[in-house]
Image (tube, rainbow, N blue to C red):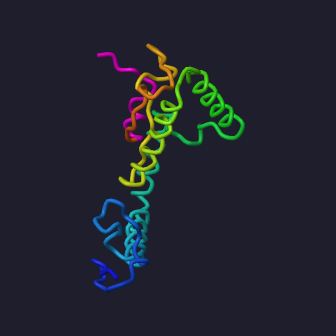
Amino acid sequence: MKTCNKCHIEKPKSEFYKKTTAADGLFWWCRDCHKVYVKTKYASAYADKEFAAKESKRVREYLKQNPEKDRRNWPTGAEAIANNAKYRHGKAKRTPKWLTKNEIWMMEEAYILAALRTKMFGFPWEVDHIIPLRGKLASGLHVPHNLQVIPKVLNRDKSNQFMVN
């Protein structure tokens, strides 16, 4: 049982959303209180027609300046499948035949570690190639010493770049 910080009613733990960063792993408000809060927050914000129009205009301007962020322009269907296949093929080409079973195991462990960290910390982690597989300055190999587990945000910021010191 847990007491909701909003309505102060003791309820079973199943009545609370999960929150991995909380000490007990649960959100501090019960599901009912959280739903009411979210509905009122967004209803009041978008009931204001002027605010809704401003927000809509701001998003349109942003997407005009940053077309790569617009999900409507992202590849779908056959094009997305082809891009994925191209990535997998490139990774396979850059995985040397001379890798030992232990090195392959180490690479698999990196992906498992990324999944565990995602579950533990509550935000996505990815396996990153320190020297990108298809970089402008250098192209690396898919080998254990070229892998690092970092948060997805940092991996996306790094993009396909290799920082030369």
State the residue at coordinates (39%, 50%). Answer: 123
Q: Is residue 70 above or below residue 132?
A: below
Q: Residue 24, position in %: x, y?
A: 31, 69
Query: Is residue 98 found left or right of 117 in the rendered image?
Result: right
Q: In the image, is residue 130 above or below residue 80?
A: above
| Quadrant housing residue 23 | bottom left
Q: Quadrant of the C terminus?
A: top left
Residue 101 percent location from the top left of the image: 53, 31
Q: Residue at x 42, y 41 (%)?
A: 152
Residue range (magenta):
152-165
Instruction: Judge left or right: residue 71 versus residue 19.
Output: right
| x then y, percent, for residue 142 | 51, 26
In this view of the protein, which residue sits in the foreground, 145 or 59?
Answer: 145
- Name which quarter of the figure residue 161 lies in: top left
Which part of the image, by quadrant, shows the N terminus?
A: bottom left
* Residue at image location 61% in from the left, 26% down from the top: 92
Q: What residue is rendered at 45% in x and 14% in y?
A: 138
Please state the total of marks drawn on the protein image: 0
User: Going by the picture, which residue comes out furthest to the top?
Assistant: 137
Q: Is residue 106 magenta?
A: no
List x then y, in percent, for residue 77.
70, 40
